[in-house]
Amino acid sequence: MMRLCLPVTIALAVSVLGGCASPKAAFYTLSPEARRDSTSSGAPVTVVIRPVSVPELIDRPQMVVRAGDNQVTIEEYARWADPLRSQIPRVVAADLGIVLDSTLVSVNPVGVDPAAAWRVQIDVQRFDATLGEAATVDVLWSVTPPGNGSPLTGRTRASERCSGPGYDALVAAYSRALATVSGDIAAAIHPAAVMRKAPSS
């Protein structure tokens, strides 16, 4: 009788453990959202995006969402596919490339003389969101022209509504907010540049 019960006991244990397994984490990436409205004029500009600084709170794999005025939640199973310090400059570079109509915008200026390029410095002051509501970014930026020109500085605060309740919508809202930042930077580099964001999906 004991021999017959043992396989049943093992099967029940495996079933219980399987039912208690932790959910798998989902991984998210930001995406370029800029669209160009104006036509290109002149040679494409060369732009280098320097390393980006972000608040320590969000410098982690997990997404951080606001749960109240003075409370945040660190989401263990909603994660960034790679660090925001890497994603943000890549997305801004892609947005700038679209708005400025240039293939010479990069975070890794291989074979480019930095002194001959526009240099962009980005300091993220705020990068937070409420799930299902809105994503907000607040960015200090500076643009240094080629040569020894004086830098142009600015600050962009952008908030975008989430188009749905989930993390996909939240990340898309972040991407649209960064497109606004990119548009302001592009206008500092080339005043004729005009940017529009992709519509919310």
Image: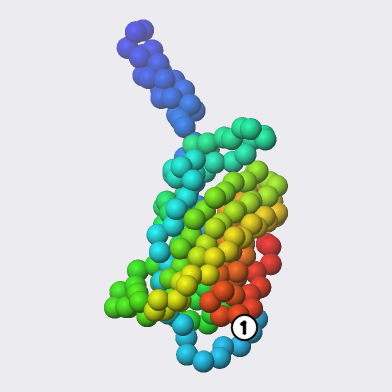
Amino acid identity at mark 1: Ala
- From the top left corner, tell me how far across and down residue 30 is, in percent: 52, 58
Q: In this view, does 10 lie above or below 130?
A: above
Q: Left or right? Give the position of 87 relative to 186.
A: left
- Kindly identify the residue that appears in the image at 61 percent across and 60 percent down: 156
Q: Left or right? Give the position of 83 relative to 65.
A: left
- Kindly identify the residue that appears in the image at 60 percent across and 69 percent down: 184
**Quarter of the figure with the N terminus:** top left
Along the viewing direction, whichever of 5 and 200 lies nearer the viewer: 200
Q: Quadrant of residue 175?
A: bottom right
* Residue beneath disc 1: 192
- From the top left corner, tell me how far across and down residue 3 is, in percent: 32, 12
Q: In which quarter of the image is residue 41?
A: bottom right
Q: Left or right? Give the position of 136 relative to 189.
A: right
Can residue 169 be seen from the camera position used here? Answer: no
Q: Is residue 9 above or below residue 170?
A: above
- Kindly identify the residue that appears in the image at 60 percent across and 70 percent down: 183
- From the top left corner, tell me how far across and down residue 123 is, in percent: 49, 55
- From the top left corner, tell me how far across and down residue 195 is, in percent: 63, 75
Q: Which residue lies furthest to the top in this view?
A: 1
Q: Residue furthest left?
A: 111
Q: In this view, does 174 lie above or below 2?
A: below
Q: Which residue lies furthest to the bottom in this view?
A: 42
Can residue 158 be seen from the camera position used here? Answer: yes
- Kindly identify the residue that appears in the image at 56 percent across and 57 percent down: 139
Question: 10 Å neighbourhood of mark 1: few (<14), some, or many (≥20)?
Answer: some
